[in-house]
Image (tube, rainbow, N blue to C red):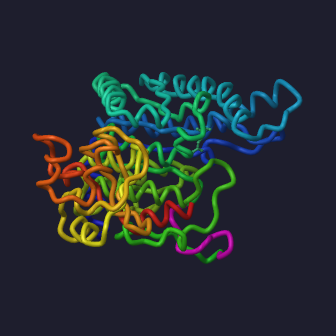
Amino acid sequence: MSADDRSKHLANVRRVLVKVGSAVLTCETRRGLELDYVALESLAAQLSELHDRDLDVVLVSSGAVAAGRGVICMSSECPKISGLPDRQAASAVGQSRLMHAYDQAFAQRGKVSAQILLTRDDLQSRRRYLNARHTFSSLMEWRAIPVVNENDTVVVRELEFGDNDHLASLLLNLVEADLFVNLTSAAGVYTKNPELHPDAEPLSCIADIARMNLNASCGGKTKVGSGGMYSKLLAARRAARLGVPTLIVSGREPRALVRAMDGEDIGTWVVPEEKIMSRRKFWLAYNREPSGHIYVDEGAVRALRERGKSLLPIGITAVRGNFARGAVVRILTEDGGRVAVGMANYRASELRRIMGLQTDAIETVLGPGLYSEAVHRDNMVLELESEWSDEESK
Ligand code: GLU
């Protein structure tokens, strides 16, 4: 992609989702890390400026835990805050402060902000997902600025997004954003760790994130926040599959967000893929935790990967788990390699009875009028090998 394509895309953006990390919103004080109200003000000013240009703006903001930590340390002996329950409690203190600061900063500029707190569970059920989508859409209609964070206080580990990069990448689909800006403490993505190599320069563009080796390019995490560059690139890769470009840019540099939106060549631009995934398939692939596993033979793997076919019972060699019809399942090779995720037409017990059988035999075993496919192509997403090997090595 040329610099031209970048500015062409920027000129046509209608809805931008901006994610800001704790590393940008906090500063070190005598009492430890605290929310940096100057940084927050500057962000609200820039977002308001974009909003004045008729852009829809959605903000995903971290900082609740850091804000809470600051308050607790001021009011008591500064207890050690570590482990999940402490972080959740700190977030309960900090989230309201964080939101209050945003409300005030936006109100001064004539804007209305709205708090949305989510857990992964809220986006896993299709019903709740669609419900959340309606909420966002009303807010957008009212020209409000949603400020989203993970609902840290109530989340249990299995339902954590883990980091807000992940949350933001899933929201791109929900809010139908056409640009993802990830504000970080680094100037962009480096090919080598800038802490170890002072001559390292940020990349201006990543043209093929699907095939990029993320482990090699991500030296080190930021000390504050939970994601680091690695999770930013994973998030950018998901965005690319949805056809949304990502701009990873420093949130610490003066007016970097507005300057980047004006086309200045700062930060790293991640080019979206040409062949994009539908919104429904994206939800299927990234929002749902599979509730069972289907193992398939080599013939089926080839049919799925190379010929774009549906999965038929004849190719199934084993079924793990107890899932219902319509459940999301992971399809694996016999030795456990990931092939796809999809929605099963049959429950696990039915699949066990028809696996290995020809299509005509399904009727004899389960009765008439059923599906020929165990998982239909339209309800299936092939897994990118690079993607899963990266996610697994996290
Ligand atoms: N939700 C956490 C907070 O507000 C941050 C998660 C993250 O850093 O990605 O502090």
Residue placed at 65% from the left, 76% from the top?
Answer: 197
Residue placed at 54% from the left, 28% from the top?
Answer: 102
Q: Is residue 88 left or right of residue 10?
A: right
Residue placed at 23% from the left, 48% from the top?
Answer: 379
Q: Position of residue 371 (x, y in %)?
A: 15, 46
Q: Position of residue 42 (x, y in %)?
A: 54, 39
- Which quadrant of the picture is home to ligand 1? top right
Q: Position of residue 127 (x, y in %)?
A: 32, 28
Nearer to us in this view, 347 or 224: 347
Nearer to us in this view, 341 or 196: 341
Q: Quadrant of the N terminus?
A: bottom left
Nearer to us in this view, 263 or 34: 34
**Residue at the farthest right position:** 77
Residue placed at 59% from the left, 33% from the top?
Answer: 152
Magenta region, main secondary structure: loop
Over which residues does the magenta segment extend?
A: 187-197
**Is 189 covered by the magenta stretch?**
yes
Q: Where is residue 5, by image quadrant?
A: bottom left
Q: Is residue 355 left or right of residue 105?
A: left
